[in-house]
Image (cartoon, rainbow, N blue to C red):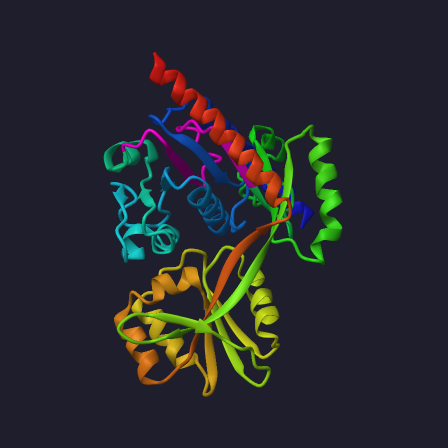
Amino acid sequence: MKIFLYLLYPFSLFYRFLFWRQQKGITSFHLPNALVISVGNITVGGTGKTPFVQYLVHFFKETYPSYAITILSRGYKAEKSREGAILQIESNPRLYGDEPSQHKETFPDVQVIIGRDRKKAFLNFNKFQSPKHIVILDDGFQHKALHRDFDFVLLDANSPFGNGFTIPIGFLREPVHHLKRADAIVFTKLTSNNREKLEKYKNLLNHVGIETPVFHSNFTASIKEVIFGRSFLLKSYESNQDKKYFLVTGVGNPNHVFETAKLSLQSDSIRKKFFPDHYEFHSGSLESLIDEIQEGEILVTTEKDWVKMRSNLQFVQTLEKKKIRLLLILIQVTVDEDQEIKSMLAALVSTYEAKIDQVSKI
């Protein structure tokens, strides 16, 4: 294994050089009249950005109802990512991306814009002319093309830095010491097991001179059953140890979803099938899934996966026809320092409003 790392290490250094050169040549653009907050990470794979973005949106909607809110995303693997687009309710995730589609479904009155060139996409599709506008830049830590007023960086508490190497021999998008650019670090997916290792990770941050405020969060999961009909309704589900389950998911950290399912369903009788992150679930794969479901098994998936699956009408009709029950794992973020982080966000908004007042008086 060490020989393999030594052989590939020059490629990791070359990647870091390319990343540095690409970032060095970029001038950040200020989105007009907007408070921009980025949610990002430094690793490849899922760190829980989607639920954390929704945590922020919930806070701003409840605390500042007069504000316009936009989620600005690349729209990874979305067909319209190159040209850019603004999402409507019930947008096709194949065209607009799974996570942006999930955001729009959760917050119909929030503007969701996608585009590989996020500056161009925002300027072309923004419909809000409000002087009070919060833009949440989804997966934006490496997107230097846009100026941001605050950078959240999420670290998966199970393995925040991987093996410590950058791509291609590790999972880091950029070296750990680049976290100095962050305004706040959030350890996500904390459990009673991985909390024991947290001090080691914090010591590593201190060792490379990072004094950024650190927060801690975990996921609160609930299980809902999908009721088929003219629209998809959700109802509470009581876990039953006698039931058999079949978990299907295509997310960045499927093993965490599996552990969450076992805990939430209070069952070890769960078969699993994992697909790559952002998997599209085309007709062929969905047909195969139907064939793999054993008699009496209940299909289980995530909300993010279901957004894509349900766009295939034939798959939905087959589930209903064969009376295959479907459960969704719904995730919410709980932050240990909830009041501290919300006070910090409130101070950020106050600073932004002060700047607006200064500009209006000129």
The residue sitting at 40% across, 59% down in the picture is 279
Give the main secondary structure of the magenta stretch.
Answer: loop
Image x and y of residue 126, in percent: 27, 36
Give the position of the C terminus as an image quadrant: top left
Which image quadrant for residue 270? bottom right
Q: Nearer the viewer, residue 360 or 181?
A: 360
Per the rendered image, the range of residues in magenta is: 129-153
Q: Nearer the viewer, residue 199 or 35?
A: 35
In this rendering, position of residue 354 left or right of residue 162: left
Q: Is residue 291 above or below residue 31?
A: below
Q: Is residue 307 above or below residue 97?
A: below
Image x and y of residue 189, in percent: 60, 53
**Outermost residue, bottom direction?**
295
Image x and y of residue 57, in percent: 44, 45
The residue sitting at 37% across, 84% down in the picture is 323
The residue sitting at 39% across, 82% down in the picture is 324
27 falls in the magenta region: no
Which image quadrant for residue 146? top left
Q: Is residue 136 above or below residue 253?
A: above
Image x and y of residue 232, in percent: 33, 70
Q: Is residue 27 visible?
A: no
